[in-house]
Image (spheres, rainbow, N blue to C red):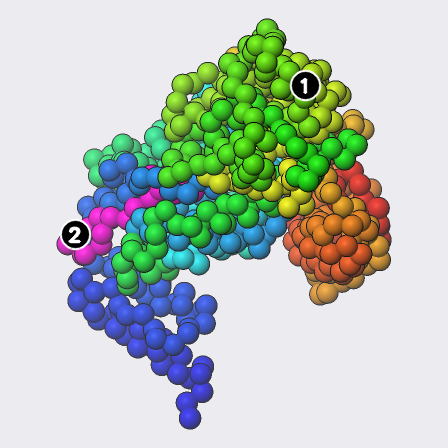
Amino acid sequence: MMTRPTFSLIVHILVLVVAAFCPVTCFGTVPTSEPTNQERTGAVEARVNNLLKQMTLDEKLTLLGGTDGFFTSPIERLGLPKFRMSDGPGGVRCFGPSTAYTACVCLAASWDQDLARRVGTSMGRDARARGVNYLLAPGMDLYRAPMCGRNFEYLGEDPVLSGLTAAALVNGIQSQGVAATVKHFALNDQEFNRHNLSSNADERTLHELQLRGFQIAVREGKPMCAMDSYNPINGVHATQNAWLNNDVLKGEFGFTGLLMSDWWSCYDTLGMANGGLDLEMPAAKLYTPGKLKPLIDSGKVSMSTIDDKIRRQLRVAFTMGWLDRPQEDKSIPLDDPASIAVNIEEARGGITLLKNDDNLLPLDPAKVKNIVVLGPNADHPVTGGGGSGYVSYFHAVGVPEALAAEFPEPGRVTHIVWEPTEHFPAGGEADLATIRAADAVVICVGFDDPGCFGPNHGSDNEREEQDRTYNMPPGHSVLIQSVVKLNPRTIVVLNSGGSVSTASWIGRTKAFIHAYYPGSAGNIALADILVGKVNPSGKLPFSWEEHWEDSAAYGNYPNPDHPKSNTYKEGLFLGYRWFDEKKIEPLFAFGFGLSYTKFSFSHLTAAKDGADVVLSVAVQNTGDRAGAEVVQVYAAAPDGGLPHPVRELKAFGKVLLKPNETKTVSLRIKADDLKNWDPATKKWIPASGDYVFGAGNSSRDLPVNCHLLF
Ligand code: BGC
């Protein structure tokens, strides 16, 4: 009998032979047995080279620019169709309504890689239902300041959390034959003057922090695509930044996929061609044959550079199977109940309970007879932030509707609608009496739903092309203060991508939930959490400062008063690394989130497994409700070498526990994730000396520790 490797080898040779001799319109065949990764790669490369060989120069150059807003260019003579792209990252935006998932920052708050993979898979299915080949997701620039209009599209302030969450999303999306696109490479963490303002950071900060998430995502998720950002990095626009694209992304990170521009973010043909940009989107303004040919003729741009760009584009198509089957899968419903179920599940995992004095929550429907729900974000469903990350939904569930489903008897949920005003009370005496008499008040505040490219104010919504204010929209803080005075049993629910000023009300409010943006149906999860059907388990993926002045970016975050600089003076000390270094108490620490039960940690051990570290920690549910807990492991490197943060997140996992149940959680830290970048030698240096690992459920609560010597 023929052994599997021999059989595979023969299949592989056959594929190469067929690919090499097949006629012009043939793209080769797909092996019928399960090939190994190496075989798969070899077969793809053979098909890529075969097609490339048949292209004229003009055809090759045509492929370097997109077309029709969201497509790659076709080559009809060779039977190469145009491939369809869609935003991302909160669902499939571009071809009619779709399921809006939670904002990515909410998914990051779940700290749940299995869940992120399921969300990616579900987005991939939504893409297939619409014939979408490229999904322009996930977004993963690091959260640096709360005002960034796109924080909601990203995955928080830490590169391990964002890198692993992005990788899980990518794995899910690509499992459906849809190419994922990590974006925006890189340092696009502010929207003010985004085309011109340079993000400046030193090389160690870039390697260890700002680019690190992308490196982890490339290593663990193998995204087929990346998208360059609008902004210059250290003075050179991303789309022509050879160091960033060639040396780092394609060189050090080993990215073999396609690097596209953000929409209309190209500035210099020669710089782009030699600077690593493979595809100009949405159309060729600078990658035109007229501009490129003289550069090729004069030898300034080599043919092998052009061929590499084409190879990368074809590699995506062959690897994803787009030339072997139709991309549109009509068996998947456009309005898919399975996607809605995933949306509810991710909201259950991500929504974060930040304050719950006197155990005001959960609201027991047997005891809480009547509830008032009010606030601008209760008056219509707010599913997401705006811009290209906004997904038009088929249907959405608002908070009053979701709560009414938990308290179905008539009259138990009263929705009071008031116009936001700086002068309270806004309503009449009857409303005030209803609020006073309620067993609980749910007040919904935060940024509004602007649609894709709605009005550009900066104070009432979050979206690309604008940064927002640190304060909530006008009137929201006053509303909270006034309602809390009328009824202390008030729960504040916030929609935003990042922190907001809470100074005027947080001390007087018993309960506070950060709901991020819930997507189409995530308010059902919010209601589940409010009544205790679901025990909250989300943990903040960013640090919440008590005052903006406490933040690492304060004083060097660009705004109309300081328009010139986006220099990362904090270096490595971003987010919790800053609060730890400066010994500032955050209002809510990175990794923090409450549960309706309690957990304890014990028996943390760390051991070497080759060059990796394996950790084990016991987690017990010591309360009386089932619940999920996030185990977070931080490492403190020994002093003496390069200066470093007090502690850094290195691994995490989520575990579901019944009351009294104990589970042992095993986590692995890859050797590369303990290295530091040495700016002097421009090399990664492995861990050395005595490391302390701490485990717990926030960056500020690490009850168990252990040492490991390297
Ligand atoms: C955004 C990208 C998006 C692209 C296409 C740009 O304005 O920055 O994130 O993918 O538009 O919509």
What is the residue that sits farthest to the top in this orientation? 423
Q: Is residue 499 above or below residue 366?
A: above
Q: Quadrant of the N terminus?
A: bottom left
Residue 664, located in which quarter of the rendered image?
bottom right
> Circle 2 is placed at which residue position?
76
Q: Secondary structure at mark 1?
A: helix
Locate residue 691 relative to residue 669 in the image: left or right.
Answer: right
Locate residue 88 relative to residue 311 in the image: left or right.
Answer: right
- Of the two numbered discs 2 and 1 on the same chain, state the one appearing first in sequence: 2
Q: Position of residue 120 (x, y in %)?
A: 48, 51
Residue 649, located in which quarter of the rendered image?
top right
Q: How far is the residue under mark 2 from the one under mark 1?
A: 70 Å
Q: Residue at x 35, y 39 (%)?
A: 97
- Identified by mark 2, the residue type is Glu
Q: Is residue 187 above or below residue 253?
A: above
Residue 104 makes an appearance in the image: no
What is the residue that sits farthest to the front in this orientation? 410
Q: Is residue 75 magenta?
A: yes
> Circle 1 is placed at which residue position?
436
Q: Secondary structure at mark 2?
A: helix
Residue 367, located in which quarter of the rendered image?
top right
Q: Are marks 2 and 1 in contact (CB under 8 Å)?
A: no
Q: Quadrant of the C terminus?
A: bottom right
| Nearest the eye: 581 or 21 | 581
- Identified by mark 1, the residue type is Arg
